[in-house]
Image (cartoon, rainbow, N blue to C red):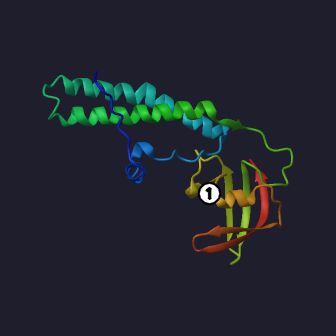
Amino acid sequence: MMSRSVATTAPAARAEHTLAPMSTRDRAPRPASSRYITAAGAKKLRDELEQLWMVERPRVTQEVSDAAAQGDRSENAEYIYGKKRLREIDRRVRFLGKRLEEVVIVSESPPRADRVYFGAWVALEDDDGAAHEWRIVGPDESDVKRGWISMDSPVARALMGKRVDDEVTVKAPRGDATYTITGIRYA
């Protein structure tokens, strides 16, 4: 009769295994961003998805097919690059499809236009008297050059629910910044 031996792992060996560096597959997922988006932002995402799916992907697929017809694929840079580009397009298409399913389109102004909420244009004055104007939008449409900041940003979170003449303090890497709200409008 054969005897069965059961291998056990010593606690020290298990502890050593848990201290191993994390691989990219073990990486924690990105923190969830807000689901709100303006109607224009949702249209922009839908347009990008349609452009990728109906124009870009068929074009790249044809390029890959043409490159594959040239013969040896292992040294064919056009084929290798084309396959890489297809993976990038497919990844973006998956992301956009999932994102568009979960976003909440905000197209109406809030009932109280005297407070800062999503979609507001907020005029501010900093401690030095410099004027700023930012629009609070969803994370998918933030663009600092246009003055659009994500509602998840520290500045936007500090502004939410405030009124004209309220002061807000925002913790920034270079130190705290204080702003006074000088105007609120919804376009």
> Residue 107's spot in the image, x, y percent?
73, 38
Q: Residue furthest bottom?
A: 128
The kind of residue on which mark 1 rests is Gly
Would you say 78 lies left or right of 41 here? left
Q: Residue at x 57, y 48 (%)?
A: 31
> Residue 19's spot in the image, x, y percent?
41, 54
Toward which corner of the image does residue 37 lie, by quadrant? Answer: top right
Q: Relative to 116, does residue 70 appear above or below in the rendering?
A: above
Q: Residue at x 49, y 28 (%)?
A: 50
Label 1 SS: loop
Would you say 106 lies left or right of 92 here? right
Q: Residue furthest front?
A: 1
Q: Relative to 85, does residue 113 appear above or below in the rendering?
A: below
> Residue 176's spot in the image, x, y percent?
66, 73
Q: Nearer the viewer, residue 18 or 64?
A: 18
Q: Relative to 149, does residue 179 appear above or below in the rendering?
A: below
Q: Residue at x 73, y 58 (%)?
A: 122
Residue carrying label 1 = 147
